[in-house]
Image (cartoon, rainbow, N blue to C red):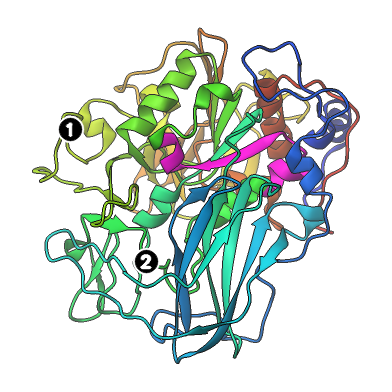
Amino acid sequence: MFRLRRRWALGLLAGGVSAAALGITESASDPQHTGTLTRRQRPPVERENRSAGEPWWPPQEPGRDADDHRRQIQGYASATSVAPGESIDFHVAVNPAGRYRISIHRLGWYGGAGARTVRTSPEFDGVPQPVPPADPVTGTIACGWPVSWTLRVPEDWTSGLYQAVFTSADGWRACTPFVVRDDRRAAALCVVLPVTTWQAYNQWPVDGRSGKSLYNGFAPNRRRDPQLRAREVSFDRPYADDGIPIQLTRDHDAIQWLERNGYDVSYATSFDLHSGRLDPTRHRGIVFAGHDEYWSAEMRRAAERAVVAGRSLAFLGANSVYWHIRVRPAADGRPERVIACAKAIPDPGQDAVGATVKWRSLGQPEQALVGVQYNGIVDGPQPLVVRAADHWFWAGTGVADGDRIPGVVGGEADGLNPDAPRPAGAATTLSVSPYRTREGGQQVQNTHLYETPQGGLVFATGTLCWTMALNRPGHRDERIQRATANVVNRIVGRRRPPVRPGPTDAQ
């Protein structure tokens, strides 16, 4: 466990790391916030987390997680998000044929258990299903497996990230994620889960032969080859191997921290922002929790509209708003089942917005919205070097300029680009962290915040390891937790009641 110096501990007691005690009331006089709470009410997520939980992916004997070579059990969902009262289908393949069941788990805090099991299906008879050939033009792999089970989401389910876990009679397991929205009540915060980025990286099946993502295909020597990648990828297929998207753990760290601290939060997906099902102006802040790289024009316009309306954005990852994508229906017309990203010109599907290339190649660099932009892959975790320690962002952390917070800069990083447009507003650079790139170059990471003329703020951590410092055992840092609470508290307008202690790595 990282030990605080005495002055840091006193600052934490004065201001509070744990947001669970940091203003569970909302201002009933705020006309912009339609989901206000009275002083006697608690946010639905806080009430939900009082329930007993259990791990959603409990340890089993080694080797019982499904893989793409044998495909013991795998499945996918018919939608990335649903509202209570709506239905979602699951499509499951079992090899060899046999019995299986589906359990549904909501991911959250739950006293550290991490999830709550909310439904278990009857047992079904499962059979193998084929891997369809990739489309010869786009590289898309879209399964047409039959519906295995339809779940009608109960009216009382709390908004959140859910996992459907498929378990065969002989103990093999895999899963697929989906989100339950709350379209009836606007929470103070809405977390947008980056399903477009999850799918962009999904190379199902990772069998050395047929799998494709927006990054790679497989060459005859079974090695990944970017020249053989797909230009379009479908959501009508499982996620690779055990079904956990490779970037999901970053989002889960943010979810656990937000829910442990009792923030009034609901959940949506990239497609909800794209389609307008999520109106970001109904919330005080929108949180982009993890690696959120693939954005449609509709997503970007919605985020920009929120900023103009005085709402706040928090980017807790890095390399956000990097690739322009196009959202397409499935071949049978079902909406939002394919994302297209040619990553090169000419783009066969180019429309009035432009080719599906980097946003900066379209003259709209991500820095114009986020405040910073992607500048490299970090060659091993590096310390975050504090800047502007007297800013309210760092209040109660006890840091001084030049202090180094170990391991926070990692994965991918963002920094200020002097040649790119900068958004209007009072901007503050909160870290200046030199790092070596994977290619051997030198770059500088910047955590950044700007306060907009309309009264909101846009915060960007500038690193993919930030949410690990919020929540993950072995990586938690009280200074990062407190600074993040300072931002989120300002977004939602919370005061500072007494502290509820959070977990430590020793627990």
70 sits left or right of 457 in the view: left
170 sits left or right of 135 in the view: right
Residue 414 percent coordinates (x, y): 43, 37
Q: Residue at x 47, y 61 (%)?
A: 246
The type of residue carrying mark 1 is: Gly
Instruction: Name the residue tied to disc 1.
Output: 354
* Cα–Cα gap, marks 1 and 2: 28 Å
Work out whether residue 82 or residue 209 is closer to the camera in this orientation and state it: 82
Q: Residue furthest top?
A: 453
Instruction: Name the residue tied to disc 2.
Output: 237
Residue 292 percent coordinates (x, y): 44, 43
Picture quarter with the C terminus: bottom right
The type of residue carrying mark 2 is: Arg
Q: Nearer the viewer, mark 1 or mark 2?
A: 2
Q: Relative to residue 21, is residue 147 depicted above or below?
A: below
Q: Are marks 1 and 2 in contact (CB under 8 Å)?
A: no
- 388 is within the stretch colored magenta: no
Question: Which of the 4 image quarters holds residue 470?
Answer: top right
Q: Which residues are magenta?
A: 256-274
- Residue 214 visible here: no
